[in-house]
Amino acid sequence: MKEYAGVALLIALFVSNALALDLLYNKRGKLAGVMNIISLCLTVALAYTFNQTQNIMIVFGIFLAIVALIVILKFVIKRQVKKKKEAKAEELDKKEKEGENNENN
């Protein structure tokens, strides 16, 4: 009986994803989002049926850590670029002021 439930969930997951793609293609984003949420729920149910929830949580944790690392790296890189631009702008201002002082003398 357990195998039939798994097969039924897998077929429902396939249909749900196909409908989500169709809705996305027909420019119905909200309904496509609903279908994606249903697909996620079906994925969890399918994993629970085959006792894979612990493995999924480990993978989810790894992906979450990778995403957090990427976000932090982007933030740090943006700050460094911004500081470099500010330093260059200050350097140009100093050169302009020195050029004006040399012209006045």
Image (cartoon, helix red, strand yellow):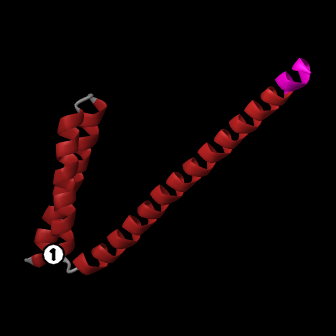
Q: Is residue 30 left or right of residue 72?
A: left
Q: Nearer the viewer, residue 82 or 45?
A: 82
| x and y percentages locating residue 103 in the rendered image | 90, 19
The quadrant of the rendering that contains the C terminus is top right
When the figure is inspected, residue 51 is found, relative to residue 17, above or below; the finding is below
The quadrant of the rendering that contains the N terminus is bottom left
When the figure is inspected, residue 37 is found, relative to residue 89, above or below; the finding is below
How dense is the environment of label 1, judged by Cα within 10 Å: few (below 14), some, or many (20 and up)? some
Q: Is residue 5 left or right of residue 29?
A: left
| x and y percentages locating residue 22 in the rendered image | 26, 36
Q: Quadrant of residue 86?
A: top right
Q: Main secondary structure of the magenta part?
A: helix
- Amino acid at the residue labelled 1: Thr
| x and y percentages locating residue 100 in the rendered image | 83, 22
Which residue in the protein does label 1 denote? Answer: 49
Q: Nearer the viewer, residue 77 or 8?
A: 77
Taking the magenta stretch, the answer to whether it contains residue 104 is yes
Tell me which segment is drawn in magenta: 99-105
Query: Which residue extends farthest top?
Result: 104
- Residue lying at 23% horizontally and 49% vertically, measured from the top left: 36
Q: Quadrant of residue 99?
A: top right
Q: Is residue 11 visible?
A: no
Taking the magenta stretch, the answer to whether it contains residue 50 is no
Q: Is residue 103 visible?
A: yes
Q: Nearer the viewer, residue 64 or 43?
A: 64
Query: Which residue extends farthest front?
Result: 105
- Residue lying at 61% horizontally and 51% vertically, measured from the top left: 80
When the figure is inspected, residue 32 is found, relative to residue 3, above or below; the finding is above
| x and y percentages locating residue 94 in the rendered image | 77, 34
Q: Is residue 18 left or right of residue 76?
A: left
